[in-house]
């Protein structure tokens, strides 16, 4: 079967305007690349099209024509919430030109809503819920629809049928490397976040699936609880493959829990130290779960920067949304990261329920006090599969605009009651961003690394007009922002009020996540037990043996 997998574009943080965000960070669509290599391994011809890629034309019709030119029998569209309606518009055009083509949607948005998607969008033939490899391969092999686990489809009477969930892939090393070679413009047309790398070219890797934690704002409907990883050997060979075939010299690991399995990370670092690849990498750590020994080993293995989720500096917000982390722990962790010779990046969320102008200012002050090398503050957007969804749509905590195209963590679709308007939130957000990048500490660190940032500076210089246009957003006044939003209407076909589609396990986790929990203040773990938290018990009693 001929299969074309598509990554739709979605919308930028300035509603209705060109997407400037790809100038700062254009990531390869790892999900469809992984599926393509899996299908090829099993004898199916695949093509990839990234609507955000360096050679992609503007507009739905032009991108749909590229998909049609590949003459597919089956089109798979992997869509987030914000890119879903773009995916639907692509499907409408494809069906109008070639109605015999089958279209399947997958990824987080359809996994978190399920059957109602087919009820509202007749141009979509199937949904692939959760992990996609097995479901998509069965579909490509022509297996009877009623026998394909993870599939949602219409039967002969037009009734929507949800098949059972399939068991997760337990050995991720069975998967071939993603099909980077099928992505037009890779690697030179794709780039990592500006000023977060010293070598080029760059690439992204994901070496684990699932998460045992229950953060209130996180949607885990695709991979759910069960945490599985690639082995250290597989990860090393993957890095080596990217270096040897594509000239990649920097990797961003986008695992949420990269260092949770300490034995694996230790083995990987030992391989990179004993058999150097000449590559750098960035990864994420969990505050309080990374020892000094681990940080030193990461540095020696080639790590440049580590990031950690902090979310807020208000103790009440942290207890409500990020149990288990305290401000002193965060501060100490940043100090230890710097002591190991690594850069520290903090990840924050602005606009969660309970947020006020004062909590934002408190977080901004804390960020400046941390001496971070980089920070990223996203605008909170409720997601259907997140435990906090029901609270956000209830109206008790704030006002929510259910516009899928704006639900990209770059727009304030949720306004907590502590703010008078979304324009006030935008103004405070822009104030903080300018304050951080204008701070003496950041400017001093940046100046010291000018030569190290030469590739990022060259990229900015090549796209100077677009960069200036994007920068103007942070100087926009409230009237300009309000005008932009008024001119951007919700997609006329988007339904509202759909309910999340959660497994029993995730429903139970949602109850736990939204229960009042005080931050744990246990004494520090003895230095003699640096690897204790990689045990199943330390990862949490909710880790299941099966799914």
Image: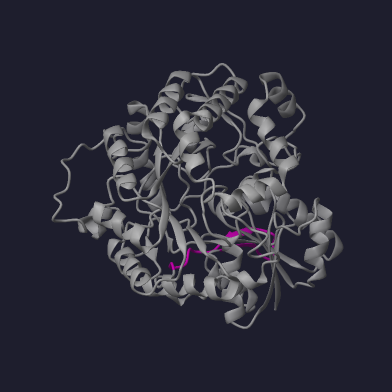
Quadrant in which the N terminus appears? bottom right
User: Number of labelled discs?
Assistant: 0
| Residue visible at 76% across and 72% down in the picture | 72
Q: Is residue 98 visible?
A: yes
Magenta part, dominant SS: loop
Does residue 462 appear to the left or right of 379 in the view shown?
right
Q: Residue furthest right?
A: 97
120, 528: nearer the viewer: 528
**Residue 419 percent location from the top left of the image:** 53, 19
* Magenta-drawn stretch contains 163: yes
**Residue 242 percent location from the top left of the image:** 54, 71
75, 352: nearer the viewer: 352
Q: Which residues are magenta?
A: 151-168
190, 360: nearer the viewer: 190
Q: Is residue 221 above or below residue 369?
A: below
Q: Is residue 83 visible?
A: no
Does residue 386 appear to the left or right of 485 in the view shown?
left
293, 451: nearer the viewer: 451
**Residue 238 percent location from the top left of the image:** 48, 72
| Residue visible at 20% across and 36% down in the picture | 521
Does residue 373 appear to the left or right of 478 in the view shown?
left
Q: How is the image coloured?
A: one colour
| Residue visible at 55% across and 53% down in the picture | 108
Q: Quadrant of residue 168?
A: bottom left
* Magenta-drawn stretch contains 373: no
Quadrant in which the C terminus appears? bottom left
Q: Is residue 413 above or below residue 335?
A: above
**Residue 111 percent location from the top left of the image:** 54, 54
């Amino acid at each position: 079967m001929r299969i074309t997998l598509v990554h739709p574009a979605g919308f930028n943080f300035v509603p209705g305007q060109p997407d400037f965000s790809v100038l700062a960070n254009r990531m390869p669509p790892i999900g469809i690349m992984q599926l393509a290599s899996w299908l090829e391994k099993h004898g199916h011809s695949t093509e990839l099209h990234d609507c955000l890629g360096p050679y992609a034309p503007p507009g739905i019709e032009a991108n749909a024509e590229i998909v049609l030119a590949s003459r597919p029998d089956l089109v798979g569209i992997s869509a987030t919430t914000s890119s879903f309606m773009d995916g639907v518009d692509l499907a409408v055009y494809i069906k109008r030109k070639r109605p015999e083509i089958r279209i399947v949607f997958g990824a987080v948005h359809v996994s978190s809503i399920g059957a109602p998607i087919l009820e509202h969008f007749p141009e979509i033939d199937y949904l692939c819920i959760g992990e996609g490899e097995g479901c998509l391969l069965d579909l490509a092999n022509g297996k009877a629809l009623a026998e394909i686990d993870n599939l949602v489809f219409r039967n002969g009477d037009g009734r929507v049928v949800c098949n059972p969930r399939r068991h997760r892939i337990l050995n991720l090393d069975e998967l071939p490397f993603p099909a980077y070679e099928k992505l037009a413009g890779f690697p030179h047309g794709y780039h990592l976040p500006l000023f977060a790398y010293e070598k080029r070219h760059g690439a992204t890797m994901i070496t684990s699936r699932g998460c045992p934690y229950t953060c209130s704002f996180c949607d885990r409907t695709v991979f759910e609880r069960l945490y599985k990883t690639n082995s250290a050997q597989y990860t090393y060979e993957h890095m080596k493959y990217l270096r040897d075939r594509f000239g990649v010299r920097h990797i961003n690991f986008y695992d949420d829990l990269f260092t949770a399995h300490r034995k694996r990370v230790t083995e990987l670092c030992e391989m990179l130290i004993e058999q150097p690849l000449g590559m750098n990498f960035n990864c994420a750590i969990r505050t309080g779960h990374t020892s000094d020994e681990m940080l030193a080993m990461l540095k020696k293995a080639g790590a440049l920067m580590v990031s950690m989720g902090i979310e807020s500096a208000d103790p009440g917000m942290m207890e409500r949304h990020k149990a288990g982390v305290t401000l002193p722990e965060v501060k100490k962790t940043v100090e230890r990261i710097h002591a190991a010779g690594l850069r520290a990046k903090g990840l924050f969320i602005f606009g969660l329920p309970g947020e006020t102008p004062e909590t934002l200012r408190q977080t901004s002050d804390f960020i400046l006090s941390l001496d971070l090398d980089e920070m990223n503050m996203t605008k909170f957007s409720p997601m259907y599969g997140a435990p906090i969804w029901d609270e956000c749509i209830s109206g008790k905590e704030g006002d929510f605009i259910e516009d899928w195209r704006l639900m990209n963590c770059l727009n304030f679709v949720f306004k907590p009651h502590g703010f008078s308007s979304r324009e006030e939130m935008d103004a405070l957000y822009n104030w903080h961003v300018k304050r951080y990048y204008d701070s003496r500490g950041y400017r001093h660190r940046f100046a010291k690394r000018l030569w190290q940032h030469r590739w990022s500076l060259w990229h900015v210089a090549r796209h100077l007009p677009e960069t200036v246009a994007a920068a103007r957003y942070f100087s926009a006044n409230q009237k300009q922002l309000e005008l932009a939003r008024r001119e951007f209407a919700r997609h006329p076909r988007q339904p509202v009020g759909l309910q999340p589609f959660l497994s029993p396990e995730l429903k139970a986790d949602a109850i736990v996540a939204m229960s009042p929990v005080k931050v744990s203040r246990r004494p520090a773990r003895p230095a003699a037990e640096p690897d204790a938290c990689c045990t199943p018990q330390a990862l949490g009693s909710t880790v299941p043996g099966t799914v």
